[in-house]
Image (tube, helix red, strand yellow):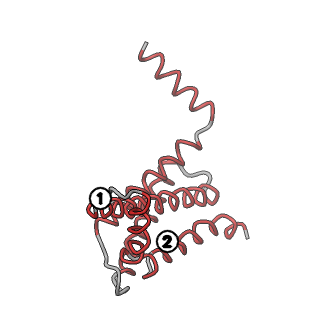
Amino acid sequence: MLIVRNWWPAVTWMGVIFLFSTDLFSGSNTSSWLHPLSSSLFPSLTNESIELIHASLRNLGHWSEYFILALLLMRALRAEIPTRRQRSLLICSWALATLYAVGDEWHQSFVPSRSASGLDVSIDSFGAICGALWFERCKKKPDESASETEKTLTSSG
């Protein structure tokens, strides 16, 4: 039962990512509401600007999906294997998230309105490493952070 408690958030988030990879969240479907919304909020925007905003939001979506996934994977791995070095957990989290990104792009290659993209995997992987690093940074023991701060202050002064 402990395994389920540790892993259900990551597995659930993987399901959300899978949903985002369906036709429902394809570029043509998201542009169908984003373009009119952007035009009404900012009437002076050109179509090119709206397209740039749309592409940027989609890339930010990729990054943030895998940032969150890596956080959840780090949480699960840390609970399951508390004696492992943090760097090993970070690498495992990043690798699992990146493998899921590859599988997700492969899944998208079968969705008629979607396509697989190596660039998307790169963005996903970057989001995953940022999420894992963020988790590691936030989970450091207070005395470790204090000693690092002291080292920085003494070396610069």
Q: Please identify the quadrant where the N terminus is shown.
A: bottom right
Residue shown at the point (33%, 82%) measured from the top left: 109
Closer to us: mark 1 or mark 2? 1
Q: Position of residue 56 (x, y in %)?
A: 35, 59
Assign a secondary structure to mark 1: helix
In-image side of 105 versus 72 (left or right):
left
* Residue bearing mark 1: 49
Q: How many marks?
A: 2
Q: Position of residue 134 (x, y in %)?
A: 50, 47
User: Which quadrant of the view contains residue 53?
Assistant: bottom left
Q: Amino acid at mark 1?
A: Ser
Amino acid at circle 2: Ile
- Kind of element beneath mark 2: helix
Crowding at dot 1, Cα within 10 Å, few <14 / some 14-19 / many 20+, comes out as few
Residue for badge 2: 17
Q: Position of residue 86 (x, y in %)?
A: 52, 48
* Residue found at the very far left of the displayed protein: 48
Q: Quadrant of residue 144?
A: top right
| Distance between the alpha carbons at the discs numbered 1 and 2 | 27 Å
